[in-house]
């Protein structure tokens, strides 16, 4: 265990004040009482007078403010808080901010449904607009982008208040003065500054290219946002025609894309098509000549071995298009419908007539129409065969993605640059992963990248790109020479502000300018959270004290998005990692076979507020802490009862020690009795184990060690020494018991404080000054010479006491029943230990007669006893 010489306070030298123990100690009301007190006292404020070596800084995930938090959030954020509280007690100034991810699609959808509106950027701003009194999500009112953004900004703070209230009740030790949002002015300036620097260094670039596109939300989608799902379809065996007129069969699930075929492809070793390579075939229905080419990506044993390449049906088409230098023939538009105008390559009478049957239809309707055309032409071989295929979806969408050619902003991430990919993998090796196997997820993601990071979105409530484009004399934008502001001018909104040297009257006019209409992907902003929270380029003093940060923490599903994107941005700007350790949480599972709890899966009916109200925050936190880093954890509400029982036991045991017996000075020198010394020695070992576990980010083991000792302390030690501690006559033995009780209780409260912040703070307030959360984390040295005693004495005496209790249980008498004779059989070393606690054992076991020790060579301790006669 590494001890921190800088401890917040000294809790071992001063004698405790006379305890003020309430008549009735209850858990109810502790959250309201202490969360209000912590807020009033600014208990968790970051001390920015500390230099970087004395600071522990955390990059906290900003939750998406879209209406609700679920129990998975509660567990994951509790894990972060456990580490924050431990580090604070170890003497660190903890920088623990909270952010809200309030831009992007989730917020837009919530605003649309809440107010019954939709954004139409073509509409002018209406200063007198008010939302419908009775919103209708199915008949949304179109409004301008400024009006829509105003509604977003109106609703988001209300959601944030609910989130903050829940986090405060849960007991997160966040410094709320370090709060930020991903849409606020600070985030806008950081995001736009970082983007301009990326652009200046050539890391960000604008390109027209095949883009994954969600037709419902009308926006581009990045690789990290893909979700592969089963999708019902059908194989269609379709005949193209060789130069000699013979059929060339292909099998496709997307016959509606036949108008966009740019090549037929087979494997170069496929003997069936050797003679066709370099020739052309004719497409069915349309009669367009199509080249037949070879590519090793074609699979000889799949279908006929011949496939059609469309631009674009899937990501394989994109690969072939790029590697074979094929033309682009796009027929699916951004709205998910086939283009209404007949493409140039279909201008022939036969092709144009056929295409008119498809123009303007959705892909589903066009597919049905195309099958009809194929039947009529005789090019459909047999009937379609139903199948289930994997299709790419936007993680928030419900229709398969299309691939359309669009102009988008990209950020280099190693997907198309081997050297940069290697650099990103090297960064992963530098990072400390908890648990270590999570690094494989990072490596697999980086190794599987197939393109750069698409960072632009065709949405409304987001941070705009700080870019304009000059228009030539005919009003065409010059995308090759964008106009950008200076960093001093940031933040800017090109949709409402003119670039330097122009005025608003020139917007959209020949010789004027056009503002970039897109906004940054929400991950493009969230990838900068260490910079936003840390005050990069706005508060350099703060930034120098907190960056690079110590910890990032989140669930394993966003390693590929949030974790990786922050590594990309920090590497680009600083040439280093943004933090040193990644603590990865597992999922909270809804039940056997039901998957993780998440909003997207619709299984978030477990209300965190209800859990907190029913069981209390300490119980919920206890359950969260039993979920080890990286491991998924099935949710069972009854487990909260165990945590509540522990919190209640802390109250009752503390009331007994402080109220019934009375606190004793925290002076280890008063501890003289062997069993007392052994208890503190056992406690010293627990302190070491809990500290080592916390240092390894293994909060679950720290809890297990502390909790196990606490129950043994209550069930065995308290019962064993109760009579001695209660003794009216002063003696060193009585003082030894009382000092041990006080010392052990005070140390245990601190060990449990990160897990049970409310009940430990309550008990602490009965007899100590200040907050327990600013007390020092315990160290073995506090326990004095007793820490060097033999802790196994506790086990042997506890075994003897358990044996005595077992005898009474078998005899079906109460624990207060007296025993006239007790015989303890065990090896001599064990008996010697038990003898050292004989007075306590007699008192606790109600032994009125002989206590006989019988030595054996080996075996477990055994107890036999006779009940004392009772009065008739």
Image (cartoon, rainbow, N blue to C red):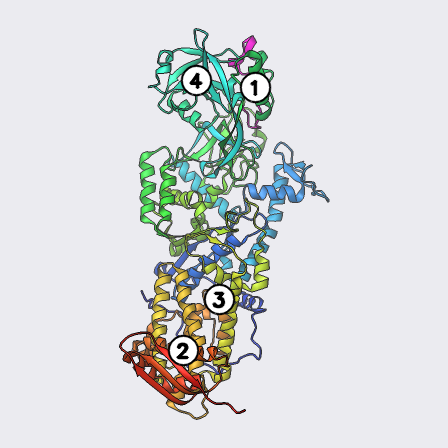
Give the labeled residue for mark 3.
Answer: 756
Q: Which residue is drawn at 31% across and 36% down?
A: 419
Give the labeled residue for mark 1.
Answer: 371
Q: Residues within 10 Å of mark 3 (few under 14, many from 20)?
A: many
Q: Considering only vertical position in the picture, is 37 above or below 101?
A: below
Closer to the eye: label 4 or 2: 2
Instruction: Tell me if residue 745 can be seen.
Output: no
Q: Residue at x 51, y 74 (%)?
A: 651
Q: What is the spatial separation of the Cα atoms under label 4 and label 2, in whole angstroms?
A: 84 Å
Residue 171 percent coordinates (x, y): 51, 62
Task: Name the image quarter holding residue 749.
Answer: bottom left
Closer to the eye: label 2 or 1: 2
The magenta span reads: 330-351
| Secondary structure mostly taken by the magenta-highlighted segment of the chain | loop
Give the labeled residue for mark 2.
Answer: 803
Q: In which quarter of the image is the C terminus?
A: bottom right
Residue 629 percent coordinates (x, y): 41, 55
Q: Would you say residue 350 sits in the magenta stretch?
A: yes
The reply to whether dot 3 and dot 1 touch (C-beta < 8 Å) is no
For marks 1 and 4 on the same chain, the one whose residue lies earlier in the sequence: 4
Q: Which residue lies furthest to the right in this view?
A: 133
């Amino acid at each position: 265990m590494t001890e921190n010489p800088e401890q917040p306070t000294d809790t071992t030298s001063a004698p405790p004040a006379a305890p003020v123990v309430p008549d009735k100690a209850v858990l109810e009301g502790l959250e309201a009482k202490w969360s209000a007190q912590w807020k009033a006292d600014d208990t968790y404020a970051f001390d920015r007078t500390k230099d970087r070596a004395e600071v522990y800084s955390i990059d906290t995930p900003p939750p998406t403010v879209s209406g609700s938090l679920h129990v998975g959030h509660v567990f994951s954020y509790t894990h972060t808080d456990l580490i924050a509280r431990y580090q604070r007690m170890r003497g660190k100034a903890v920088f623990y901010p909270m952010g809200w991810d309030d831009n992007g699609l989730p917020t837009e959808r919530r605003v649309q449904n809440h107010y019954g509106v939709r954004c139409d950027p073509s509409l002018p701003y209406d200063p007198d607009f008010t939302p419908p009194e009775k919103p209708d999500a199915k008949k949304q009112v179109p409004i301008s982008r400024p009006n829509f953004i105003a509604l977003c900004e109106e609703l988001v703070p209300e959601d944030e208040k609910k989130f903050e209230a829940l986090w405060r009740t849960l007991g997160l030790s966040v410094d709320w003065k370090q709060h930020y949002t991903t849409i606020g002015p600070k985030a806008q300036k950081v995001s736009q500054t970082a983007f301009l620097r990326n652009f200046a260094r050539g890391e960000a670039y604008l390109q027209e290219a095949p883009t994954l596109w969600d037709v419902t939300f009308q926006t581009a989608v990045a690789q990290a946002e893909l979700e592969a799902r089963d999708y019902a379809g059908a194989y269609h065996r379709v005949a193209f025609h060789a130069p000699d007129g013979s059929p060339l069969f292909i099998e496709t699930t997307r016959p509606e894309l036949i108008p966009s075929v740019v090549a037929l492809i087979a494997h170069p070793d496929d003997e069936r098509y050797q003679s066709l390579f370099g020739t052309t075939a004719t497409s069915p229905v349309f009669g367009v000549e199509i080249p037949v080419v070879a590519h090793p990506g074609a699979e000889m044993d799949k279908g006929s071995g011949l496939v059609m390449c469309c631009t674009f049906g899937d990501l394989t088409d994109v690969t072939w298009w790029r590697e074979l230098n094929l033309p682009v023939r796009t027929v699916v538009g951004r709205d998910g419908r086939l283009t209404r105008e007949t493409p140039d390559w279909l201008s022939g009478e036969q092709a144009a007539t056929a295409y008119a049957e498809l123009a303007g239809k959705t892909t589903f309707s066009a597919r049905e129409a195309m099958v009809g055309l194929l039947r009529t032409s005789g090019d459909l071989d047999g009937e379609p065969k139903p199948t289930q295929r994997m299709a790419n979806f936007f993680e928030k969408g419900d229709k398969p993605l299309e691939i359309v050619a669009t102009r988008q902003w990209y950020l280099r991430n190693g997907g198309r640059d081997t050297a940069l990919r290697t650099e990103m993998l090297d960064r992963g090796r530098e990072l400390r992963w908890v648990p270590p196997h999570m690094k494989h997820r990072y490596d697999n993601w980086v190794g599987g990248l197939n393109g750069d990071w698409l960072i632009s979105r065709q949405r409304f409530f987001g941070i705009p790109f700080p870019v304009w484009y000059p228009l030539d004399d005919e009003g065409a934008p010059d995308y090759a020479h964008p106009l950008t502001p200076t960093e001093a001018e940031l933040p800017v909104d090109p949709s409402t502000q003119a670039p330097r040297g122009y005025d608003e009257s020139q917007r959209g006019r020949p010789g004027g300018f056009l503002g970039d209409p897109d906004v940054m992907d929400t991950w493009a902003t969230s990838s900068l959270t260490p910079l936003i929270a840390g005050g990069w380029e706005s508060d350099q003093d703060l930034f120098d004290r907190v960056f690079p940060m110590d910890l990032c923490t989140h669930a394993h599903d966003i390693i590929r998005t949030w974790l990786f994107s922050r590594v990309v941005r920090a590497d680009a700007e600083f040439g280093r990692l943004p933090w040193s350790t990644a603590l990865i949480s597992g999922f909270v599972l809804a039940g056997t076979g039901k998957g993780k709890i998440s909003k997207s899966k619709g299984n978030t009916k477990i209300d965190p507020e209800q859990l907190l109200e029913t069981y209390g925050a300490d119980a919920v936190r206890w359950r969260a802490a039993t979920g080890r880093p990286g491991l998924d954890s099935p949710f069972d509400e009854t487990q909260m009862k165990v945590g509540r029982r522990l919190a209640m036991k802390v109250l009752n045991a503390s009331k007994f020690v402080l109220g019934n017996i009375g606190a004793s000075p925290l002076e280890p020198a008063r501890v003289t009795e062997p069993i007392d010394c052994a208890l503190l020695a056992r406690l010293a070992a627990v302190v070491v184990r809990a500290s080592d576990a916390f240092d390894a980010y293994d909060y679950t083991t720290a809890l297990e060690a502390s909790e196990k000792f606490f129950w043994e302390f209550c069930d065995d030690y308290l019962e064993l020494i109760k009579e001695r501690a209660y003794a009216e006559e002063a003696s060193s033995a009585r003082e030894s018991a009382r000092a041990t009780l006080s010392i052990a209780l005070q140390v245990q409260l601190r060990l449990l404080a990160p897990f049970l912040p409310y009940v430990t703070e309550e008990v602490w307030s009965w007899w100590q000054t200040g907050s327990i959360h600013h007390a020092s984390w315990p160290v073995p040295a506090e326990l004095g010479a007793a820490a060097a005693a033999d802790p196994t004495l506790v086990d042997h005496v506890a075994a003897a006491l358990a044996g005595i209790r077992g005898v009474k249980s078998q005899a079906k008498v109460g624990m207060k029943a007296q025993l006239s004779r007790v015989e303890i059989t065990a090896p001599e070393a064990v008996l010697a230990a038990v003898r050292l606690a004989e007075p306590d054992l007699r008192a606790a076991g109600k032994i009125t007669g002989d206590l006989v020790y019988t030595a054996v060579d080996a075996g477990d301790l055994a107890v036999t006893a006779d009940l004392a006669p009772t009065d008739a």
